[in-house]
Image (cartoon, coloured by chain):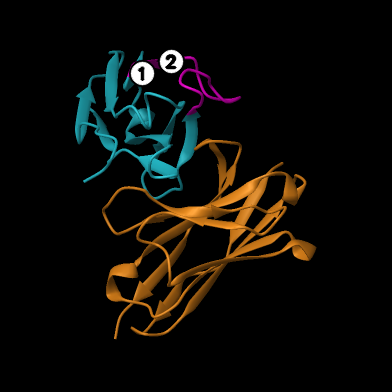
Chain colours: A orange, B cyan
Amino acid sequence: QVQLVQSGPELKKPGASVKVSCRASGYPFTTYAVNWVRQAPGQGLEWIGFINTKTGKPTFAQGFTGRFVFSLDTSVNTAYLQINSLKAEDTAIYYCARDHGVARLDNWGQGTLVTVSS
Amino acid sequence: QSVLVQPPSASGTPGQRVTVSCSGGGSNIGSNNVNWYQQLPGTAPKLLIYTNNQRPAGVPDRFSGSKSGTSASLAISGLQSEDEADYYCAAWDDGLNGVVFGGGTKLTVL
């Protein structure tokens, strides 16, 4: 069955970087894009962007350009989200999700809590 | 302030029918399909309705979706206690060139 498994929780200081992984299984990895979604504590879902797993081309939502980086390692069916120059307001659960097309995110990872605190 | 507007809360008693609305504009709901997600407490979101009114395998037919113009609705009939969750609408926005979510509706089963 389709599964997306994310890396464990992270505690980082402001200004540091973090890299979250999302390993996919149960389907041909390069067939579907991988989206990233953020959920701050007690808040709603916020779309960060997606990466085309065939070409590696990223697309970012407004407000997520510059510090956010998407990457892939297709040899291990894994997508990555790296956040640089972390700020306290980046504290959130970050989810990866398989993109079946046009906002149809049909399988989600379990989420990775990133806490930014001095 | 979310691009798609949902009521922050909704409630109903077991067995009742409840609806959750989602209001957008011409660049999102007006020209693209709407998807709905259910997030049970402490868990990842799950796709509940796609392409306005389609249910993924395993989703009970108590859940239904509809779209008209620049608005969409999620209906839950025969409300059950396990339906208590947050519900989000989402659509592609042609102007923003990205996915937009509603702010979410917290459903309480009384």
Q: In the image, is A113 to the left or to the right of A97?
A: left
* Residue in the image at 53% along x and 35% along y: A104
- Residue B110 visible (yes or no): no
Q: Mark 1 points at which residue?
A: B76
Quarter of the view holding residue A67: bottom left
Q: Height in image: A80 above or below B62?
A: below
Q: Where is residue A78 in the image (x, y as percent from the top left)?
A: 68, 62
Q: In the image, is B51 to the left or to the right of A28?
A: left
Q: Where is residue B15 in the image (x, y as percent from the top left)?
A: 31, 13
- Label 1: how many residues lie within 10 Å, few (<14), some (14-19) or many (20+)? many
Q: In the image, is B12 to the left or to the right of A61?
A: left
| Amino acid residing under circle 2 | Arg
- Nearest the viewer among A88 and B41 is A88
* Residue in the image at 43% along x and 42% along y: B99
* Residue in the image at 74% along x and 50% along y: A30
**Regarding mark 1 in the picture, which secondary structure is present there?**
strand
| Amino acid residing under circle 1 | Ile
Q: Identify the magenta region.
A: B49-69
Q: Which quadrant of the figure contains the N terminus of chain A?
A: top right
Q: Mark 2 points at which residue?
A: B62
Tell me which numbered mark, 2 or 1, is placed earlier along the sequence. 2
